[in-house]
């Protein structure tokens, strides 16, 4: 589904991503781990199109997307979330969801005057989809709350909900467990698993919470110094001496 081939991202003489190659199989939840500074988020930025790589290629669904803009990748179903949620904090939770779907009938002033009925029907369809998304995420009780007032865990669920309001096929999740209490973290894990198994979403998951990685991810890829060290199941990756050395004493699950 996704192929990253010899990707490089240089800042002056420093290579944040250094000849990185990996692939993601459709229908998988791929875990991406590694110590801070390993290049994981930079890799996400390259795949999502935040900036172009210094060299290398990115292929998605068989198409070379290396030169495509972020919005073009979004319309192809490649969507990312952020470690720090990017909600519109003054809008309600419902409004945050309803504004996501592209090409809505009411996006132009003229359409609101000339095709009011079409705009109204489209808005009702989007609202119904948003209501269904909130029900799935168990956030109906905060539908009219301003998004900026949500807890960290609720914001992460809202970010996941915003990907559901698109035609996402591949979702890049950047540290979804960060700032989330254990109760909401278990709920977040449950929703990701359902979206993967029952609704066909493919995920790449950057995460330092090894319990979450162990529960959800296969395969697991460990990066260090901008490169892939090893790929395999969680137990194999966790036990690899190169992985333990890369973390330099940081906690890696039971290791």
Image (tube, rainbow, N blue to C red):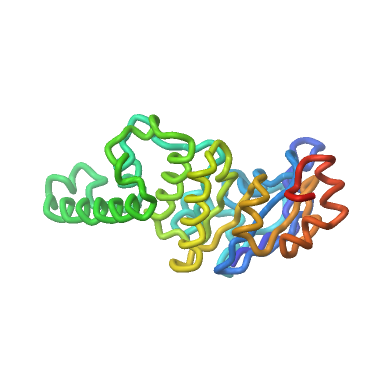
Q: What residue appears at the point 18 percent right and 51 percent down from the top-left corner?
A: 119
Q: What residue appears at the point 44 percent right and 46 percent down from the top-left corner?
A: 157
Nearer to us in this view, 221 or 113 = 221
Residue 95 rendering spot, x and y as whole percentages: 30, 41
Task: Left or right? Give the position of 91 relative to 8.
Answer: left
User: Quick check: 232 above or below 35?
Assistant: below
Q: What residue appears at the point 26 percent right and 46 percent down from the top-left corner?
A: 107
Kindly indicate the quadrant of the structure image that contains residue 232.
bottom right
Q: How many marks?
A: 0
Nearer to us in this view, 84 or 70 = 84
Residue 49 rendering spot, x and y as whole percentages: 57, 49
Residue 245 rendering spot, x and y as whole percentages: 87, 47
Residue 78 rendering spot, x and y as whole percentages: 51, 57
Task: Left or right? Give the position of 232 relative to 185.
Answer: right
Task: Left or right? Give the position of 162 relative to 236.
Answer: left
Q: What residue appears at the point 61 percent right and 63 percent down from the top-left corner?
A: 2
- Image quadrant for the N terminus? bottom right
């Amino acid at each position: 589904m996704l192929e990253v081939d010899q990707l490089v991202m240089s800042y002056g003489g420093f290579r944040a991503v250094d000849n990185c190659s990996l692939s993601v199989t459709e229908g998988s939840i791929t875990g991406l781990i590694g110590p801070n500074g390993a290049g994981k988020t930079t890799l996400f930025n390259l795949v999502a199109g935040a900036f172009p790589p210094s060299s290398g290629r990115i292929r998605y669904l068989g198409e070379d997307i290396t030169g495509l803009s972020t919005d073009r990748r979004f319309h192809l179903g490649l969507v990312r979330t952020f470690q720090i949620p990017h909600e519109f904090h003054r809008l309600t939770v419902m409004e945050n969801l309803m504004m996501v779907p592209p090409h809505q009938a009411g996006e132009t002033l003229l359409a609101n005057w000339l095709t009011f009925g079409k705009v109204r029907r489209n808005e009702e369809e989007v609202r119904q989809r948003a209501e269904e998304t909130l029900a799935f995420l168990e956030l109906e009780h905060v539908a009219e709350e301003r998004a900026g007032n949500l807890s960290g865990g609720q914001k992460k669920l809202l970010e996941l909900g915003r990907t559901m309001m698109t035609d996402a096929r591949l979702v890049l999740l950047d540290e979804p467990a960060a700032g989330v209490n254990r109760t909401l973290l278990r709920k977040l894990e449950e929703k990701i698993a359902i979206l993967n198994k029952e609704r066909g979403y493919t995920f790449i998951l950057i995460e330092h919470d090894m319990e979450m990685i162990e529960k959800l991810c296969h395969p697991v890829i460990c990066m260090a110094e901008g490169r892939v060290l090893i790929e395999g199941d969680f137990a194999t990756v966790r036990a690899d001496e190169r992985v333990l050395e890369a973390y330099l004493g940081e906690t890696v699950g039971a290791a």
